[in-house]
Image (cartoon, grey):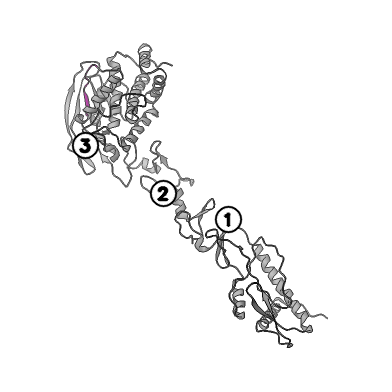
Amino acid sequence: MAPPPPSTQERKSRFMKWLSKLFKGGSSRGGGARYPQFLGDENMVWHAPSTSVDDRPRIDKEKEEIDRAISLTLSEDLKRQNGCRWGKNNDEDIARALQDNLNLPKYPPYAPAKHDNLNLPSYPPYAPTLLYPRMGFRTCGGCHRDIGYGNYLGCMGTFFHPECFCCRACGYQIIEHEFSLSGSDPYHKSCFKELTHPKCEVCHHFIPTNGVGLIEYRCHPFWSQKYCPSHEHDSTARCCSCERLESWNSRYISLGDGRSLCLECMESAIMDTGDCQPLYHAIRDYYEGMNMKLEQQIPMLLVERQALNEAIVGERTGHHHMPETRGLCLSEEQTVTSILKRPKFGGRKLIGMRTQPQKLIRRCEVTAILVLYGLPRLLTGAILAHELMHGWLRLKGYRNLSPHVEEGICQVLSYLWLEAEVMPGYRSAPSTSTASSSSSPYSSSSKKGAKSNVERKLGEFFMHQIAHDASPAYGGGFRAANAAVNKYGLRCTLDHIRLTGSFPL
């Protein structure tokens, strides 16, 4: 009766005993000579143990068990899944133990890649073989050198030394278990969020997600200022001129009537009636250069918000831009409080403003032109150009015009003046930069008419406001009037309005 097959534990015990005897230099049986074998380019000497004829069947069985163990190891390695993982070669400790027993240099053992086949190498007849790694086995995607053995990272089909797996943004090593990928570039999660997640330009925090997990924010159509939706309803101040929200890193100036002004707009703000006179006369000269001279001297006053609103109530005719009216062409006799002396800075507020009531008497079709104080020079000039066009139409006998036509053509004159200031020579229209030198100490263009980049950008914004106004009279009227002026010219358009009360098609 045949003996039962040896168990796994018995085979392992016999295998380790065989290795122990082998590494001690030979077999206990027989006394044959030892023959050296030279393997590879290192000329390392292995002493093959002497054997007898009786030992060959046992050794063949042990070799078969070694081959089966190696095949099992390779099969398990092939079953590993692809993806990003940290790895450590399983046979590293065994190789080191074998080399310690042999007192040989520590060369790393061979670990085949996943795409290698399972054809096992040939072995010498009665000696174990040390397998060497092939050149270019694994190449680091960071330093482009062979990885060898030890810890490594496999990611998207590429391998890295741990110290070579670095963030594309900051350049520091990624040691976290979770990271972000953009294409094939790795990032720390925090670095990737800094690069891709929008920040609020008011509170400077990451814009939060809404109830469905989406990043929701508001963005100004001209300035591209991104901010949290909550800032539209909290106490965040908005510049009454450029419409930008106040950042937590800066402070706006309070004008005392519910309005706030950013520091950039404050640089060229016109604060009292005396400051505005040079600009007003320059715009009258601009009209004269367009062959639209104003014969009568129309008074012009800079007023506070409350005074302007009271004047609107007393005016029985006219169409007003809502929700904020910043200029008015009066036709009725009224008493208006104007600003006589500019205020001074007191922290974040303006203090010490001096006003005086002034009775306006009607001597022609136009009583006076009122403009809100505290606005930048270009915005103040655009309002003056608009209101002077109202005065010119009334003085020249243009009667009973619809708001669409009258406000539209007035907006065209405002736009043309801004265009001459921001882009002089664009339509060969006269510029008022030199003639409109303001005496305001806030003005960045008060001496030589040269405009800073900040003021030029503001002018472009005011033109954008006119062109994209959503109201039917101011926005729709401007676009219709501007199309007519571009096609037929200003003079022909005005003549057609006088005859028909509408724009030429």
Q: How many marks?
A: 3
Kindly tell me whether residue 262 is visible in this rendering: no
Answer whether residue 347 is visible to the viewer in this image.
yes
Q: Which residues are magenta?
A: 295-302
Disc 2: which residue: 206
Residue 451, horizontal then vertical, whole percent: 29, 34
Q: CA distance from mark 3 to mark 1?
A: 63 Å
Helix, strand or loop at mark 2: loop
Residue matched to label 3: 441
Which residue lies under the disc numbered 1? 156
Magenta portion: prevailing SS class: loop
Determine contact: label 1, label 2, CB under 8 Å.
no
Q: Which percent across, then down, holds residue 8? A: 70, 76
Image position of 354 with respect to 394: above or below: below
Q: Amino acid at mark 3?
A: Pro
State which tag comes first along the sequence, 3 or 1: 1
Q: Quadrant of residue 323?
A: top left
Q: Residue at x 70, y 78 (%)?
A: 127
- Quadrant assignment for the C terminus: top left
Please name the amino acid that badge 1 sits on. Answer: Met
